[in-house]
Image (cartoon, grey):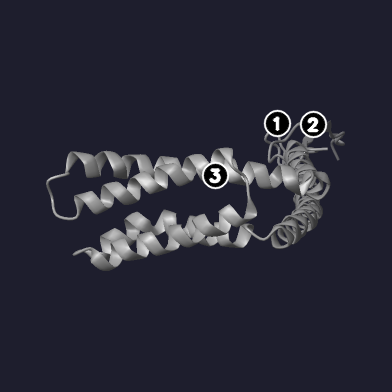
Amino acid sequence: MTTSQQRILIGGMIGIIVGILLLVIPVSFLINVAFIVIGVVTLISAVPSLVVSIANVKEKGAVADIVMSLISVVMGLVLIFWHSGIMMIVVGVYMLIFPLIRVLLSENKLNQLKDEAIRMILGVVMLLVGPGEFLQTLIRVAGVVIIVLCLVYVVIGMIKSGSKKVKATEKTGARVFVDYTGDGIADAVMVDTTGDGKADTEIKLENDSSDT
């Protein structure tokens, strides 16, 4: 087995293991992990906004930004320590509505939309993750898809790697006739037996040199 085939096999096996874990790990555990991850991301996105809003407290609309940033921080902490499907939906609605309000009130709506994109995406994710049945189905389907894709990846990768090896071996056997004496008669044959483009085997030829 070549190095390329080993890498393909290892990568495929890792993906298959991940898919199997998604199928066998309890959904409740995955939900808890999702809550924590989204809560951490919410905090990471909210804290800088809060700091900037406090620094610019004298500017127009800064108070509203501070309030919304504080609410986002609270929501992030709640998501980390309080795991509930209903809470997920409530926070999801908040993460969609508040960024939308900020975009509508902003003078530069395009830049504000870019700044709020992460929060709005998180809101959509929370609304989708909220219903436990949907999340369970989504995780199971994701596990099956990952396993199938990894199997296809391994099979196709092995086939392509094998075809490359065959093409390389087809190059073997290339011969170069060598005339060491300069009499116009070949004295040896240099053969490329490995297919690397370099002659590695020399075959001596016996020539009749008798005078007529």
Q: CA distance from mark 1 to mark 3?
A: 87 Å
Q: Is residue 146 left or right of residue 117?
A: right
Percent position of residue 18, x then y: 75, 44
Q: Give amino acid for label 2.
A: Glu
| Near-viewer residue (74 or 137) | 74
Percent position of residue 85, x then y: 64, 54
Q: Which residue is mark 2?
A: 202
Secondary structure beneath label 1? loop
Mark 2 vs mark 3: in front: 3
Q: Which residue is mark 3?
A: 79
Secondary structure beneath label 3? helix
- From the image, which quarter does the N terminus lie in? top right
Q: Give amino acid for label 1.
A: Thr
Residue occupying the point 67% across, 35% down? 182
Q: Which residue is mark 1?
A: 181
Percent position of residue 99, x then y: 36, 60
Q: Which mark is residue 14?
A: none
| Near-viewer residue (129 or 197) | 129
Upstream in the sequence, badge 1 or badge 2?
A: 1
- Asked if residue 40 can be seen in this view, the reply is no
